[in-house]
Amino acid sequence: MQLASAYTSAALIGRTQEQQALRSPSALPEGNGATGAPDSTAKIAAPTQDQKTRGPSQTGTSIAAKSATDSTAENAAEKSAETAKTAAKSKTAGANAVFARYDLTRISATEVDHMTSELKSAGFDDLGFLLGLERQGAAYRTEMETRANVPGYKTDSGFDASAPMDLLAKTRSERDLAHRYGQTTERLDSQLAKLEVAHMNRPSAAAPAGPSAQMAETLVLFQAQRLWIE
């Protein structure tokens, strides 16, 4: 009987302790609402919603900044291209002005040196063409003959730096000779083509010396037509 009462008392005490534990605030889970969700979830959700609210404004600002950057880059590229075109036109005009002062069909080796120097001063930067001209100049020819001299022997090639020469014909002859012996003619072909263009662009070379045959024929026909009408 006493043992049964002891078991009953222990059971009542345990039940009482469980009820007190359930009623204690520390036993309740930290959270917001009946679901017991952590408060940190609500705190994180609020900034996320705020970021969504601010998102379109920030995105629009970024697009505008990128558009301004792209526009600035395009303007800089256009200005650079225009500057390059202007510089190229200036160099071409300067080179044409130099070529206009020389007749390439009657030019001396000394004049070739002068023309080459003037082209460099004008900003002409076709190095291959300039080297080809220097090979025809007086300074280069004199240096080559000096190196070819053998001590104790006197050599005289009869070179006259002031004598006029046809630079076009001379370059064409060198090209044909290289072709005949199976050598590459790419450099000489390019040099000859550029010399011919430079010579044809000269005002005196482009303008006819007198009335052409076609013009004379037209005048004759016009006179004949007038006589026939009268």
Image (tube, grey):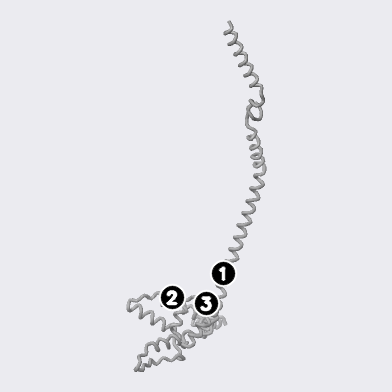
Q: Is residue 85 above or below residue 18?
A: below
Q: Across the whole image, how many numbered discs are drawn on residues?
A: 3
Q: Secondary structure at mark 3?
A: loop
Please state the horizontal and vertical placement of residue 222, each as a whole percent of the image. Answer: 54, 81
How would you rate the neighbour count of disc 2 (Cα within 10 Å): few for under 14, some for 14-19, many for 20 or more?
few
Q: Secondary structure at mark 1?
A: helix
Residue holding disc 3: 124
Please state the horizontal and vertical placement of residue 64, each as a whole percent of the image. Answer: 64, 52
How would you rate the neighbour count of disc 1 (Cα within 10 Å): few for under 14, some for 14-19, many for 20 or more?
few
Give the amino acid type for the residue marked by disc 1 in the picture.
Ala
Q: Does residue 180 appear to the left or right of 112 in the view shown?
A: left
Give the amino acid type for the residue marked by disc 2 in the picture.
Ser
Residue holding disc 1: 84
Q: Nearer the viewer, mark 1 or mark 2?
A: 1
Please state the horizontal and vertical placement of residue 208, each as a whole percent of the image. Answer: 51, 83
Residue drawn where x is 39% and y is 92% of the image: 158
Q: Nearer the viewer, residue 83 or 1?
A: 1
Task: Give the distance between the C-alpha atoms of the residues marked 1 and 2, in whole angstroms.
Answer: 24 Å
Q: Secondary structure at mark 2?
A: helix
Residue holding disc 2: 190
| The quarter of the displayed image where residue 165 is located | bottom left
Residue drawn where x is 65% and y is 20% of the image: 20
